[in-house]
């Protein structure tokens, strides 16, 4: 069977991934925003008995710069294996999209232009003369509405005709090809922009004098210097509230189901030695299922809601609102999006840092992402608030969680400021930020995409790290030299350092053993305090911790250290993968830990002085 390779290219937010998924059947999301990759995803489909490999390149505006996305796209287009291209354009803003199409047509005469989102263009009173546009560009042009499937059969037919037709003469001597292949100066982008403007003026007509009226009205709220940030904060507060409240019941249900299954498995292994049953069920099984029951529900709620915000068009506007603030710290406005991702999961936040073009600013965002408390730390923060702050503060304690997130934001900004003037000094980069049109999200696709791309991916890594940790915790709790478990010996050893930080040895050991997943920190601490042999349920923790001498000062220091300590194992593995550097991974571990130690020690000193 013959095999062909073609690339799929286009600006961000033109529905390119929808076209990719529709053609290949792969529900893979590739693009410029949080949680998406700057690499080229690849799928395949069969066309007239021949296999067609489709490389989905990152969304870019041009091939005329050296940012990560445009370099990846240019390499894919210029690859000797590439036989042709499909360039996806947004029918609502065709003039802006045609500049990239003209560049790719110059490099690959075998090109099909797909004018997508024709349904949205029609709603805005925009009409595109497809035959005229094809005549002006000199290539086949197909109109589609990929979300509804309209025009995709015609697109496949156009690709088939492109691959079976004669190969046009390549423009080997074009300034663009010479520049990309030989490192010569890039041609002026104005040339392509002027040609794009001329072509669009002949192929596009408008029946509405202001087709983007609705978008501008919404932007007066979301981008206003007075209302923009407060409205975004309220939206995120609502998102967090829904996540925290909505995750309670499914978490309890999962925990009960796993407990019943654990009892069944324990009975089924009745013929095995007691130590083996304990290690497998009370150690590995109970730890892994605890992580799943606490981690899965909030992530399954947070990430679909977050992706709905993304599809609606809010995330780029958050970057726009906070760009000035982050530029003052020497960082980039896109870091705001990676921080928001970090609230769901720091590993996803680190992955989302790929969208930041500047390597220096990308490193700053990676090194500081752990200051944003993830979903795994919320149970600890909520439990401490309920036990120690609600009796004192009453209903005002509801402001503690947003206050903790605000603290993480402030420390992120300050740390970014310090890094940008020391280890990672440099001038903040300029970047192009597109504000996509507001769109009604496709809820079903959003749920599937967020669960597969983010929730299940992160949960799998967390479980892989939790399994060996569960075995270690069980061994430490059940090996008892002198009648005392090793956990207590370790806690006693760490007690002086704990007291210096306003904590105790059990708390410090809980954080250390909770390295695979923040969700197990409190259960490990309870296990140490009770001298238990397995992780302990959260019921009755108030009395238990009060009996250990905990007070308001202990709770405050523990909340600070919960926000500011080393990343979990999943986040560390992700940082290592993204930076490909042990040095930067070690620094990402050290920075939040050192800041947490300093703040805890200061808090403890102030409380004792008062």
Image (spheres, rainbow, N blue to C red):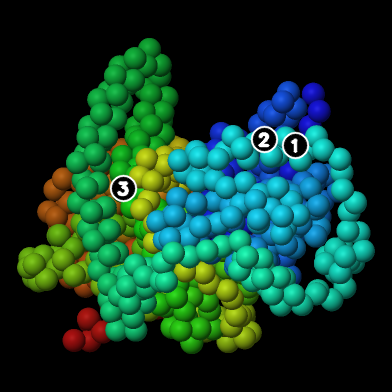
Asked if disc 1 and disc 2 are in contact, CB closer than 8 Å, the reply is yes
Residue 268 visible at all: yes
Q: Which residue appears at 59% of the width and 55% of the height?
A: 129
* Label 3: element kind: helix
Residue 336 in picture, x, y percent from top left: 44, 70
Q: Is residue 141 left or right of residue 520?
A: right
The residue under label 3 is: 301
Q: Nearer the viewer, residue 431 or 302?
A: 431
162 w.r.t. 61: above or below: above
Q: Which is closer to the viewer, label 3 or label 1?
A: 1
Whichever of callouts 3 and 1 sits on the residue coming sooner in the sequence is: 1
Question: Disc 1 versus disc 2: distance between alpha carbons?
Answer: 6 Å
Residue 567 in picture, x, y percent from top left: 46, 60
Whichever of callouts 2 and 3 sits on the residue coming sooner in the sequence is: 2
Q: Nearer the viewer, residue 134 or 351?
A: 134
Residue 514 visible at all: no
The residue under label 2 is: 157
Q: Is residue 404 left or right of residue 129?
A: left
Q: Which residue appears at 27% of the width and 65% of the height?
A: 235
> How many neighbours does mark 1 have within 10 angstroms: few (below 14), some (14-19), or many (20 or more)?
few
The residue under label 1 is: 161
Q: Is residue 521 left or right of residue 110?
A: left
Circle count = 3
328 w.r.t. 153: above or below: below
587 w.r.t. 303: above or below: below
């Amino acid at each position: 069977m013959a095999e062909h390779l073609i690339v799929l290219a286009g600006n961000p937010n033109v529905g390119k991934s929808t076209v990719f998924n529709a053609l290949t059947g792969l529900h893979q999301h590739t693009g410029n925003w949080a949680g998406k990759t700057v690499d080229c995803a690849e799928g395949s489909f069969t066309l007239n008995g021949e296999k067609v490999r489709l490389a989905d390149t990152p969304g870019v505006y041009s091939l005329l710069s050296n940012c990560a996305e445009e370099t990846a796209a240019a390499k894919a287009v210029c690859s000797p294996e590439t036989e042709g291209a499909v360039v996806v354009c947004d029918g609502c803003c065709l003039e802006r999209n045609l500049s990239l199409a003209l560049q790719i047509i110059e490099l690959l005469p075998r090109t099909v232009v797909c004018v997508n989102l024709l349904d949205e263009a029609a709603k805005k009173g925009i009409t595109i003369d497809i035959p005229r546009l094809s005549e002006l560009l000199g290539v086949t042009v197909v109109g589609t509405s990929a979300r509804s499937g309209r025009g995709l059969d015609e697109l496949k037919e156009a690709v088939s005709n492109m691959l079976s037709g004669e190969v046009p003469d390549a423009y080997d001597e074009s300034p663009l090809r010479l520049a990309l292949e030989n490192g010569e100066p890039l041609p002026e982008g104005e040339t392509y922009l002027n040609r794009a403007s001329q072509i669009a003026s002949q192929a596009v007509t408008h029946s509405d004098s202001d087709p983007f009226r609705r978008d501008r009205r919404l932007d007066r709220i979301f981008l206003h210097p007075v209302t923009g940030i407060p409205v975004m904060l309220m939206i995120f507060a609502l998102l967090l509230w829904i996540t925290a409240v909505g995750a309670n019941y499914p978490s309890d249900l999962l925990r009960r189901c796993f407990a019943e299954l654990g009892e069944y498995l324990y009975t089924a292994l009745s013929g095995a030695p007691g130590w083996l049953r304990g290690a497998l069920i009370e150690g590995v099984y109970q730890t892994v299922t605890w992580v799943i029951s606490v981690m899965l529900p909030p992530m399954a709620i947070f990430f679909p809601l977050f992706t709905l915000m993304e599809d609606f068009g809010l995330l780029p506007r958050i970057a726009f609102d906070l760009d000035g603030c982050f530029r003052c710290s020497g960082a980039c406005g896109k870091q705001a999006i990676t921080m928001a991702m970090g609230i769901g999961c720091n590993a996803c936040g680190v992955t989302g840092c790929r969208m930041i073009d500047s390597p220096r600013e990308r490193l700053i965002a990676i090194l500081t992402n752990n200051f944003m408390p993830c979903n795994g730390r919320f149970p600890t923060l909520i439990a401490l608030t309920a036990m120690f702050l609600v009796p004192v503060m009453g209903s005002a304690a509801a402001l503690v969680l947003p206050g903790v997130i605000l603290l993480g934001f402030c420390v992120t900004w300050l740390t970014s400021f310090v890094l940008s003037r020391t280890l990672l000094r440099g001038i903040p980069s300029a970047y192009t930020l597109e504000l996509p049109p507001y769109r009604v999200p496709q809820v079903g696709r959003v749920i599937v995409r967020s669960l597969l791309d983010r929730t299940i991916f992160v949960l799998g890594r967390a479980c892989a790290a939790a399994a060996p940790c569960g075995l270690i915790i069980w061994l430490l709790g059940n090996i008892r030299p002198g009648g005392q478990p090793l956990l207590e010996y370790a806690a006693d050893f760490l007690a002086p350092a704990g007291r210096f930080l306003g904590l105790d040895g059990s708390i410090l050991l809980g954080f250390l053993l909770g390295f695979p997943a923040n969700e197990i920190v409190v259960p490990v601490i309870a296990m140490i305090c009770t001298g238990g042999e397995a992780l302990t349920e959260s019921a009755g923790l108030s009395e238990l911790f009060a009996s250990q001498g905990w007070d308001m000062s202990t709770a405050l220091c523990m909340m600070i250290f919960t926000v500011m300590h080393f990343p979990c194992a999943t986040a560390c593995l992700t940082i290592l993968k993204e930076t490909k550097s042990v040095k930067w991974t070690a620094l990402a571990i050290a920075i939040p830990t050192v800041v947490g130690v300093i703040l805890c020690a200061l808090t403890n000193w102030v409380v004792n002085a008062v």
